Image (cartoon, helix red, strand yellow):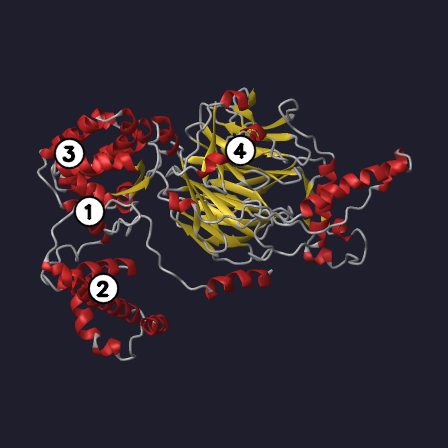
Amino acid sequence: MAAVQGSLVESVDKKDIKTEPSEDGGGNNNNANDGKILSPSPAPTTPAEGNSTAAGTSVDQQTLLAVLQFLKKNKLSESVDILRREAGLPEDSLDSKGGDSSGEATGDAGRSADADGADASSLLSRVTVSSSAVAPAPTKAPSEDQPDVNVVLSAYSQQGDPALYEVYYKGLKKFIESVLDCHRAELSQVFYPLFVHMYLELVYNSHENEAKAFFDKFSGDQECYYEDDLRVLSSLTKKEHMRGNETLLDFRTSKFVLRISRDSYQLLKRHLQERQNNQIWNIIQEHLYIDIFDGMPRSKNQIDAMSGSLAGEAKREANKAKVYYGLLKEPEIELPLDDEDEEAENEEGKPKKKKPKKDSMGSKSKKQDPNAPSQTRIPLPELKDSDKLDKIMYMKEATKRIRLGPDNLPSICFYSFLNAYQGLTAVDFTDDSSLIAGGFADSTVRVWSVTPKKLRKVKSAADLNLIDKESDDVLERIMDEKTASESKILYGHSGPVYGISFSPDRNYLLSSSEDGTIRLWSLQTFTCLVGYKGHNYPVWDTQFSPHGYYFVSGGHDRVARLWATDHYQPLRMFSGHLADVTCTRFHPNSNYVATGSSDRTIRLWDVLSGNCVRIFTGHKGPIHALAFSPNGKFLASGATDGRVLLWDIGHGLMVGELKGHTDTIYSLKFSRDGEILASGSMDNTVRLWDAMKAFDDLETDDFTAATGYIHLQDNSQELLLGTYTSKSTTVIHLHFTRRNLLLTAGSYNP
């Protein structure tokens, strides 16, 4: 196993580390060449601009030397040498130039770094601020001795007359309400981010009464799906409240993305320039990213379908990377004929009839999907003999699988957890549906056998020495019959267990907890093998890869992590969400990971590079359920808004919306062949949807739309195949067996 992991780790080391501009930060740098970012209003050229190139070079060198000094101070000599060689600086550059240039550039910032132990990124930001101010005005460094939060908030210090904020906002509102209907819906998107930033500017500059009046007057005009954010905002009434507030820092550091047609944008720009409304123009320039597209303006319904996330819509550029969503080629395993069962009952010719059916099953999986990644794109564990046996069992079961459809719905078996006073928080089934596990708020994990076969532990080491290791039934002999029971309790966590996942080979169980750890349990000894520590806060979810060995976790620290069972540190950290990562799912080919978040977005991450390759927006509440279709082409998501959204991964577009649930959706699952999508909710219902019809009705011509949007049909009632209500049991988990029987689980709440 270690060898498998080694190659993935090496692939990281060999790649060049490139620093790319973040989505939230440096996108607003006066270059409107692609028409996608607002350009500043025209200003007369000054003589100072002529020297910008020369000044820029010296500033860059000062910044570089400051970074080298910082690395040297922290004894990172290897990094110093690498950076110096790449920049083409001589070996004595730090000694000769470091004294004056970086000393001048980082005078106050250096002291601040010593005092506060600031990290490299904060030092860089201060160096840039101070070095650009060095040449024209060396004394101008007001905010360098303050913590990083103040650097972030300092943008709000550029204020106008507080009494005019209301006038400006009301004037813009009056203008937008007076434009043509086709532009009004698009331009109305500007209201919410402008409202937030204008309110924060008033609060930051200690105009508390004006801020309260501004909030009371215009907060009611905002869209209903921003209610929770506005509630948090209303509690920020003093400058002191703003320091350390996560929601505010998110809003300030990540640009709010608006997608607007070119015609609508020109209207807005012309209005602001004619009125010389610099206050609003500056906020748009500083804090918003306008993604301009050519074509017809979008309607109110189209905009509402895609908006609602913490930072607006996703940029169209974010969803253009190539995604290998196809399935990996299945290993070639010969399926032996089950002679005992068939030949006893059938005549000679009948097994031969069955043989082609089984062969076709194998050959179907052996075809290489053109959209699939290469087999060696990421290192995967080799199949053991036990895995091959399990594959054969799976293929045999598949031949007996029931074909589902609108006229042939699955039977549903509901496992109700009665008297679950410990508080059931998570459930999972093994792939072969033989075991069920539950995570509880009392920090325990419980495992039950669903079949008559009881759970047994492996014998002690002393007893194992007495066993004949050459015997055919050695795997049976190593189990201790004295320990046989229908369930086992696993102790180890020190907080509620929020996520659990069985390994594909049924030998291990993962659990994630409020205590910030993920534990790997052996289902042979029912003991904890490893405690993975990396998250600093509660871990909301964890899931094994479909191929085993790798697993993913996500938590309150807003970061998802990729792990391997034999490494105690994460292999990848997927950072980008603006709030808790609430659910995680592996793509069927194990090359991608999907994460859902409280920031109301879904992100798809490439396991190989660690990059975010898709951002999906449209939900109006935190996301709690994700499910990939069996063919890997589509993703379904469910959230607290009670909606199930369907996404095309290859094109990066929303392709369907299923409405019907009245409460949070906790679980989603596609049937084994992808014909049916099941959704379970806190409204005590399981709903079945016609997934085949939802995806087949798509018009592929729409995928080329320049708006990054296709027309959604409001056909939820046509796609709803059935609603099944429990007496008073919330549906926490759904699972289709290998023969397409639907198993559901939840705790009964009288």
122 lies above or below 345: below
Which numbered disc, 3 or 2, marks the residue closer to the eye?
Answer: 3
Which numbered disc, 4 or 1, marks the residue closer to the eye?
Answer: 1
Secondary structure beneath label 3: helix
Identify the residue position indicated by label 4 in the image: 668
Spatial distance from mark 4 to mark 2, Cα to Cα?
51 Å
Decide which of tag 3 and tag 2 comes sooner along the chain. 2
Amino acid, disc 4: Leu
Identify the residue position indicated by label 2 in the image: 114
Which residue occupies 36% across, 70% down? Answer: 79
Discs 1, 2 touching: Cβ within 8 Å: no
Q: Position of residue 91 (x, y in %)?
A: 30, 79
Q: Position of residue 596 (x, y in %)?
A: 44, 40
**Dot label at residue 417:** none
Amino acid, disc 3: Ala
Amino acid, disc 1: Pro
**Dot label at residue 211:** 3
In-front residue for pair 438/688: 688
Spatial distance from mark 4 to mark 3, Cα to Cα?
43 Å
Amino acid, disc 2: Asp
Q: Residues within 10 Å of mark 3 (few under 14, many from 20)?
A: many
